[in-house]
């Protein structure tokens, strides 16, 4: 297995998006593009990427704008340089095109976690013809107040500036998760694995608060994710698989989770499935029983 880095220049504003790829020793069976969540970075996905590479797949993950190394300076963490959540979605499509050019004639599976799950679901609207399979991991439930949250973020931006870091917006976005496991410490809502939670808390590229601009993008992603119109559905037979932990704080409820699956069926996708992992939290790929998740992800990709 070989690991190397790559850089893709965003067509939106010229921002350099930093990525990593793990390559199998033999002939590759396909490409898996991973899209991380909020307040984290691509290197947290290296264990999954290495697993996929050892099983014959080109596994790639990039730092989304305002995350990891895809910033010009440290103060840019949580700042998206856009107000409408369009750049972050188009960046994802750009990385797909880059990977298809670098490793041609291979099927592509797109995997999006948490905020990344909303990015890939918005990606579907215009770019479902670029991929062969989609995995939606840890997707937040629909929130009817997403539009109101966007307006609130806009109002705070007008008075405090787009780089202001609002504790109120932070609580609206992730406060429920931290509050649910408050005795275990920040980040414990992500996983039962305390070592991973500790590493998350200690990592300056994870332990930061979005700017108002970042939250405006996050809430817009939520609004667009569950908007029923605008899907071109160029690939109606696209296999789409939802996976989440039953104890995920952003899940909402089993009913809300199934409604998220049904939402894509209603817009025209005919091959949508899902699996809830009993007792697992938000980052099922980092939880104590992650081997089961890894095996299931591999099985879906290979099927």
Image (tube, helix red, strand yellow):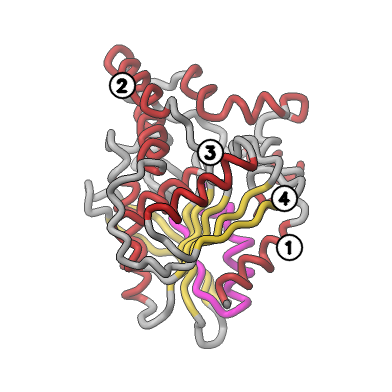
Q: What is the CA distance from the residue labelled 3 to the residue labelled 1?
A: 25 Å
- Is 77 in front, or is 191? 191
* Residue at the far front in the pictured view: 266
**Which of disc 4 and disc 3 is earlier in sequence?**
3
> Element under label 1?
helix
Q: Give the mark, 2 or 3, whose residue is nearer the N terminus.
A: 3
The residue indicated by pointer 2 is: 154
Please report contact status of discs 3 and 4: CB closer than 8 Å, yes or no. Answer: no
Percent x, y of residue 129: 32, 68
Where's residue 162, x and y in %?
31, 24
x, y percentage for residue 7?
Answer: 35, 60
Name the residue located 63 percent from the left edge and 37 percent from the top edge: 253
- Frontmost residue, 154 versus 253: 253
Is-magenta flag for residue 54? yes
- Residue carrying label 1: 291
Give the class, few, some or many, for how many residues have Cα within 10 Å of label 2's Cα (few <14, many ≥20): some
Residue holding disc 3: 141
Q: To which quarter of the image does residue 201 belong? A: top right
The alpha-carbon separation of the residues under discs 3 and 4 comes to 20 Å
Residue at mark 4: 287
Left or right, 76 with respect to 112, comes to left
302 relative to 75 in the view: left or right:
right
Q: Quadrant of residue 96?
A: bottom left
Residue segment shown in magenta: 41-62
């Amino acid at each position: 297995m070989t690991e190397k880095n790559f850089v893709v220049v965003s067509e939106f504003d010229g921002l350099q998006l930093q990525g990593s790829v793990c390559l199998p020793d033999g002939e590759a069976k396909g490409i898996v593009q991973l899209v991380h969540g909020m307040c984290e970075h691509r290197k947290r996905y290296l264990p999954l990427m290495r697993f996929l590479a050892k099983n014959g797949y080109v596994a790639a993950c990039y730092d989304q704008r305002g995350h990891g190394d895809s910033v010009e300076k440290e103060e840019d963490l949580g700042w998206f340089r856009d107000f409408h959540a369009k750049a972050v979605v188009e960046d994802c499509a750009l990385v797909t095109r880059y990977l298809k050019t670098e490793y041609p004639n291979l099927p592509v599976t797109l995997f999006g976690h948490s905020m990344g799950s909303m990015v890939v679901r918005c990606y579907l609207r215009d770019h479902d013809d670029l991929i062969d399979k989609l995995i939606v991991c840890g997707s937040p439930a629909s929130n009817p107040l997403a539009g109101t949250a966007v307006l609130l973020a806009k109002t705070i931006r007008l008075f405090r500036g787009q780089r202001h870091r609002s504790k109120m917006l932070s609580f609206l976005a992730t406060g429920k998760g931290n509050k649910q496991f408050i005795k275990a410490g920040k980040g414990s809502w992500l996983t039962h694995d305390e070592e991973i939670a500790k590493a998350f808390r200690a990592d300056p590229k994870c332990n930061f608060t979005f700017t108002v601009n970042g939250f405006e993008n996050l809430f817009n992603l939520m609004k667009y994710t569950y908007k029923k119109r605008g899907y071109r559905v160029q690939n109606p037979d696209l296999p789409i698989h939802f996976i989440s932990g039953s104890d995920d704080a952003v899940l909402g409820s089993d009913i809300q989770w199934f409604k998220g699956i049904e939402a894509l069926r209603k817009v025209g996708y005919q091959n949508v499935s899902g699996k809830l992992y009993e007792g697992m939290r938000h980052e099922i790929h980092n939880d104590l029983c992650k081997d089961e998740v890894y095996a299931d992800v591999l099985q879906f990709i290979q099927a």
